[in-house]
Amino acid sequence: MEKIKKVKGFTLIEVLVYMSVAAILFTIVSISVQNQKMKQNFAVEKRNISMFIRKIQQHAQQNRKEYILDFQISKNTAFFMEETAGKKDIIDKMAISGEISYMTNNTDKNADFVRRTTEEGNFERGFSVYLLNKKGDRIYYRISTNTVNAAKYPIISIYRAKKPINIKDDYTKSQLWEEEL
């Protein structure tokens, strides 16, 4: 009598289980990588925007002149300009990332805005730029200039949302923010 050899292999159910586990792991890793990339984008933008604002302020302080910050959200660009005899000359410009969304504390949250410095390097009026996720529905950071207590030394503050804030919520409440040092 011949012995029947058992063929070792995987059943269809085992293959489906392994594929499901692999798909779940891939999804978890993918989400983790996306979150890490978003954190990196925020870190770079916070640094770039605050350094650009600081550069304009220091230039005004050193030269004892007024300069212009033209923050164009619509064009993903911020301009540092000088106005002489009604003509605006670009001194420097900065590209802002298209990987995240922005809004301001102006009436039209997505509108471009212009601020002038004083000769001391302060801005004529304070402003805030909010950094949002790419969809534009959650706020993560706020970069603000304070002109009230900054008569001589301009203040730039960066605030992190304690948890992402829905743009439909009242994001002006101070208890939603923690200041970064």
Image (tube, grey):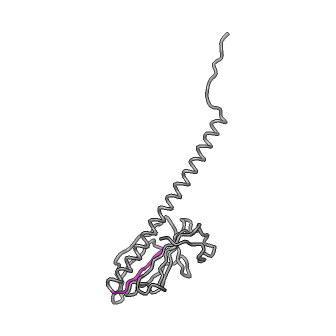
Q: Quadrant of residue 168?
A: bottom right
Image quarter (top left, top right, bottom left or bottom right) of the N terminus:
top right
Of residue 98 and residue 132, the one placed in the foreground of this image is: 132
Vertical comparison of 43 with 112: above or below: above
Identify the residue at the far left of this view.
63
- For the point 51% across and 61% down, the residue is 38
Vertical comparison of 157 with 20: above or below: below
Q: Position of residue 78 (x, y in %)?
A: 42, 75
User: Does 152 sit left or right of 140 as displayed?
Assistant: left
User: Does 119 sit left or right of 111 as displayed?
Assistant: left
- For the point 35% across and 75% down, the residue is 92
Q: Quadrant of residue 171?
A: bottom right
Magenta-colored span: 64-74
Q: Position of residue 42 (x, y in %)?
A: 48, 65
Q: Position of residue 57 (x, y in %)?
A: 39, 80
Of residue 141 and residue 70, the one placed in the foreground of this image is: 141
Q: How many marks?
A: 0
Identify the residue at the far bottom of this view.
85
- For the point 63% across and 73% down, the residue is 169
Q: Position of residue 15 (x, y in %)?
A: 62, 36
Vertical comparison of 148 with 50: above or below: below
User: Does 113 sit left or right of 139 as displayed?
Assistant: left
Whether residue 61 appears in magenta in the rendering, the answer is no
- For the point 61% across and 39% down, the residue is 18
Identify the residue at the far front of this view.
181
Whether residue 73 appears in magenta in the rendering, the answer is yes
